[in-house]
Image (spheres, rainbow, N blue to C red):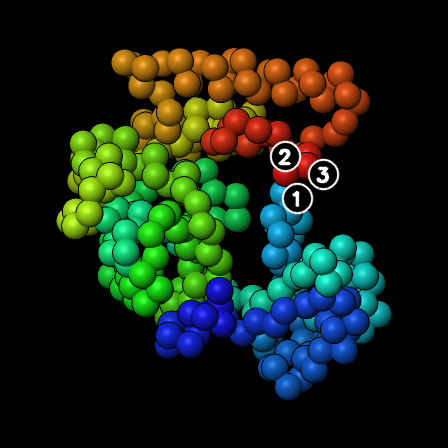
Amino acid sequence: FTTLAASMGLGVPDRHRITDPQQVIDFDWADHGAGHGSGTGAGRTYILKSLAYDPVRRMDLTELPRPTPAETAAFVRSLPISPDNPWILQEFVRGQEYCTHATVRDGDVQLHCCCPSSGFQINYEMVDDPEIEAWVRTFVGELRLTGQVSFDFIRSDDGRLMAIECNPRTHSAITMFYDHPGVARAYLDAGVPTVYPTRASRPTYWLYHEIWRILRRPSSIAERLGVLARGKDAIFDMTDPLPFLLVHHLQIPALLLDTVRRGTEWVRIDFNIGKLIEPAGD
């Protein structure tokens, strides 16, 4: 993805495909503006990302190289890197993250949204960023894509815009279209003017995730109540309450009971898609 985007003149970070831990151990850090002992914030640093979806390690932003070659080698060898399970060594860029979702037809963007992002994204609020939208339009237009495509971007501290990830699927940010009457047309008809979240739409959140945040950090209650006051639950609708009721009061409890039955561990509850994140699960 990043190589293809770079060939179109679009901004992406430095990246290297990794199929063997030794490739990272032998990597010429100095030649790429990094070096052992450079420390966080000094010079260029990298992170390793699994190309296959990894529900647990996807949150690991361990910066490389580590302070010593031995520490770098130990970390890399702890990862399941192989020719059948390739990873990417990607430049770690500090700055503001954004996520986008687009529904496209023959290279035309028929639906688009963009919002500030984070490592574990579960709150969405539309921002208008013409440079990000132009990046998306160029990429999907060059390839004449049809389908759904979601990008993750980062605007570096020095202002450079780079795409760091692409996912060929719906993004949870699509919940921002909860009050838009034109979403179905964007999917079913050709030549539709680009659909954006309405100006009246409120930021979306998942109620039980906000409650969990309050329980974990009671001092954040004022902040979380502010989120609830100015936003809207992503799936609750007075005219159709079953999805909200069933996800939180049937789906999640059933999954938790199943882990007890199987004697397995779980890392986190992902309320926005109704699943448990398990160490060896999807």
Find out whether the residues at labels 3 and 1 contact each other: C-beta distance under 8 Å.
Answer: yes
Determine which of the numbered discs, if any, sits on residue 56 in the image.
Answer: 1
Q: Is 203 or 86 nearer to us in this picture? A: 86
Q: Residues within 10 Å of mark 2 (few under 14, many from 20)?
A: some
Q: Is residue 175 left or right of residue 162?
A: left
**Quadrant of the image containing the C terminus:** top right
Left or right position of 237 against 172: left
Q: Residue at x 32, y 15 (%)?
A: 240
Which residue shows up at 76% across the image and 27% down it? 264
- Residue 235 is drawn in which quadrant? top left
Label 1 sits on what residue type? Val
- Is disc 1 in contact with disc 2, using a CB cutoff of under 8 Å? yes
- Say which residue label 2 marks: 277
Q: Residues within 10 Å of mark 3 (few under 14, many from 20)?
A: some
Q: Upstream in the sequence, badge 3 or badge 1?
A: 1
The quarter of the picture where residue 98 lies is bottom left
| Residue 67 visible here | no
Quadrant in the rendering for residue 10: bottom left
Q: Which residue is mark 3?
A: 279
Give the spatial CA distance, label 3 vs label 2: 7 Å
Q: Say what secondary structure mark 2 lies in.
A: strand
Kind of residue at badge 3: Pro
Residue 26 visible in the displayed image: yes
**Amino acid type of disc 2?**
Ile
